[in-house]
């Protein structure tokens, strides 16, 4: 398999460049979520024995290295294919295909698990409506919004960022009133960073490995390279700034939470821990935070579907996937409409299939028999979210490692100037991602390996043993 770069302008319909730097940052923040640590705060606190703030800050530094690599590669190849294009051009087209296929798993699962989570949360607020109806509703709404075009999605992102920002401010205000409502010594305010009574290196590193997942999704910014104004500058800035903003915001959210609810006090429900924390500061926030997390996952699912559609477009245009379907652009809205429909269909069907698989494992292989009642509980419950979230990281971390290698080769190994600034970020980014990937759960590794095997088999068939040429367009910067 070989690669060829072409720059033929106006040869066919292209994606439209309308996204500003602000649009890109808002997209990244929405996909990652401004309330990112809230959904997993209970798990983080339990694993790190209260050192959530420190773990989030360490994770931020780690992901900034990979974010720098993504931004630099977007300068060289402002393409919707993202990691697929970077690795194919700098490492090897076959390795690029494998990287792209691993990203497809990541990007397909993100809107899928967001559909599952939103349906489960909406079912709690409106239990009279079965969760399966909510799954259909959210999968359809994600698809309809994304069919309206990229600028419509950008406006929706702005509105959601404002709404979630208002809730975060309310939490900070209520939290400050609660915290300063009683006298405290200096140790009280430093405890979230370091508590000698509970600290352990194993607990901190274990918490950090989970906290890194707070940032997964920032790479979606690079898939919008062909719809961004001045992509060679703005993609790098947006990627790094998004990681930094989310990291600082997440650290402050965790800091306030740990001051309100010490790690020594168990949560009534570890999965909704932050709702209880907010409710302790101000009772109405218990419900408000629940709605906010629903909104956050809605935005994340909407943004993830955009990224998935653009990744498939990049692979289709390069002939790694059937070009007539995946490489087509709608003439009216200038979007890869076929891919939007496909991702929506996968999210809908997958939401049911993943629920059944997870539920069967829980009820049939466990102590409870698989009866009609338990089957209904499976379809109306949230059994699939945890399983899907674990599987998602398999593909994401492979892509992160690939991009770090590509950045190392292009900017250090093949460069006449051997600058440490081009050596340290990709090396540290690769090593950290490799360590996380090796510590994935066994189910994630098994399912991910099956997905990769299927993709490689398809690639062998599609490219006649990876001998056919792939064409990588670098679109004009209009």
Image (spheres, rainbow, N blue to C red):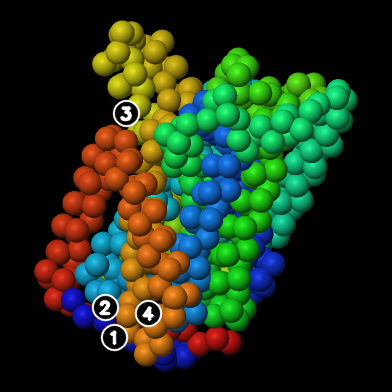
Between disc 4 and disc 1, the foreground one is 4
Q: Using the numbered discs, state the Cα–Cα distance from disc 4 to disc 2 in whole angstroms.
A: 25 Å
Q: Residue at x 45, y 36 (%)?
A: 201
Q: Using the numbered discs, state the Cα–Cα distance from disc 4 to disc 1 in whole angstroms.
A: 23 Å
Quadrant where the N terminus is found in the figure? bottom left
Circle 4 residue:
412
Circle 2 residue:
470
Between disc 3 and disc 4, the foreground one is 4
Q: Sort mark 4 into few (<14), some (14-19) or many (20+) by Cα contacts within 10 Å.
A: some
Q: Using the numbered discs, state the Cα–Cα distance from disc 3 to disc 2 in whole angstroms.
A: 37 Å
**For residue 23, side relative to residue 9 (left or right):** right
Q: Sort mark 2 into few (<14), some (14-19) or many (20+) by Cα contacts within 10 Å.
A: many
Circle 3 residue:
357
134 and 189: which one is in front? 189
Q: Quadrant of residue 347?
A: top left
Up-down relation of residue 24 to residue 290 (above or below): below
Badge 3 element: helix
Q: Using the numbered discs, state the Cα–Cα distance from disc 3 to disc 1 in whole angstroms.
A: 42 Å
Q: Sort mark 3 into few (<14), some (14-19) or many (20+) by Cα contacts within 10 Å.
A: some
């Amino acid at each position: 398999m070989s690669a060829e770069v072409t720059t033929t302008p106006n040869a066919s319909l292209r994606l439209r460049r309308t996204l500003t730097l602000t649009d890109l940052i808002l997209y990244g923040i929405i996909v990652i979520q401004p309330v990112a640590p809230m959904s997993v705060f209970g798990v983080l606190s339990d694993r790190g024995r209260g050192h959530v703030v420190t773990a989030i800050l360490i994770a931020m530094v780690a992901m900034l290295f990979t974010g720098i690599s993504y931004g630099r590669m977007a300068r060289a190849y402002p393409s919707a294919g993202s990691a697929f294009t970077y690795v194919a051009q700098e490492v090897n087209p076959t390795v690029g295909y494998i990287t792209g296929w691993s990203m497809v798993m990541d990007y397909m699962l993100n809107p899928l698990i967001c559909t599952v989570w939103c349906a489960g949360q909406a079912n709690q607020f409106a239990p009279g409506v079965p969760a399966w109806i909510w799954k259909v509703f959210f999968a359809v709404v994600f698809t309809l919004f994304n069919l309206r075009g990229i600028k419509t999605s950008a406006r929706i992102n702005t509105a959601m960022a404002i709404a979630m920002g208002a809730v975060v401010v309310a939490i900070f205000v209520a939290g400050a009133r609660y915290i300063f409502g009683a006298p405290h010594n200096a140790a009280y305010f430093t405890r979230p960073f370091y508590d000698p009574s509970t600290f352990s290196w194993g607990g901190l590193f274990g918490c950090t490995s989970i906290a890194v997942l707070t940032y997964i999704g920032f790479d979606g910014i690079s898939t919008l390279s062909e719809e961004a104004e001045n992509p060679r500058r703005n993609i790098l800035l947006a990627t790094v700034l998004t990681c930094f903003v989310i990291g600082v915001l997440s650290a402050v959210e965790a800091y306030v939470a740990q001051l309100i609810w010490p790690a020594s006090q168990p949560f009534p429900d570890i999965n909704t821990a932050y709702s209880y924390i907010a409710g302790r500061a101000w009772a109405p926030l218990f419900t408000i935070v629940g709605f906010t997390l629903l909104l956050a996952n809605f935005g994340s699912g909407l943004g993830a579907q955009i990224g998935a559609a653009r990744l498939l477009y990049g692979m289709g245009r390069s002939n790694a996937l059937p070009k007539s379907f995946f490489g087509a652009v709608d003439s009216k809205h200038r979007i890869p409409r076929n891919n939007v429909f496909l991702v929506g269909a996968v999210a809908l069907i997958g939401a049911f299939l993943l629920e059944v698989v997870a539920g069967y494992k829980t009820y049939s292989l466990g102590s409870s028999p698989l009866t009609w009642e338990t089957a209904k509980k499976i379809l109306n419950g949230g059994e699939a979210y945890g399983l899907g979230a674990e599987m998602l990281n398999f593909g994401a971390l492979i892509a992160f490692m690939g991009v770090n290698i590509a950045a190392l080769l292009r900017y250090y190994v093949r460069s006449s100037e051997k600058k440490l600034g081009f050596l340290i970020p990709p090396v540290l980014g690769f090593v950290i991602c490799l360590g996380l990937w090796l510590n994935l759960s066994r189910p994630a590794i098994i399912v991910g390996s099956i997905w990769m095997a299927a993709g490689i088999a398809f690639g062998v068939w599609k490219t006649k043993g990876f001998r056919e040429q792939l064409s990588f367009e670098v679109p004009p910067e209009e």
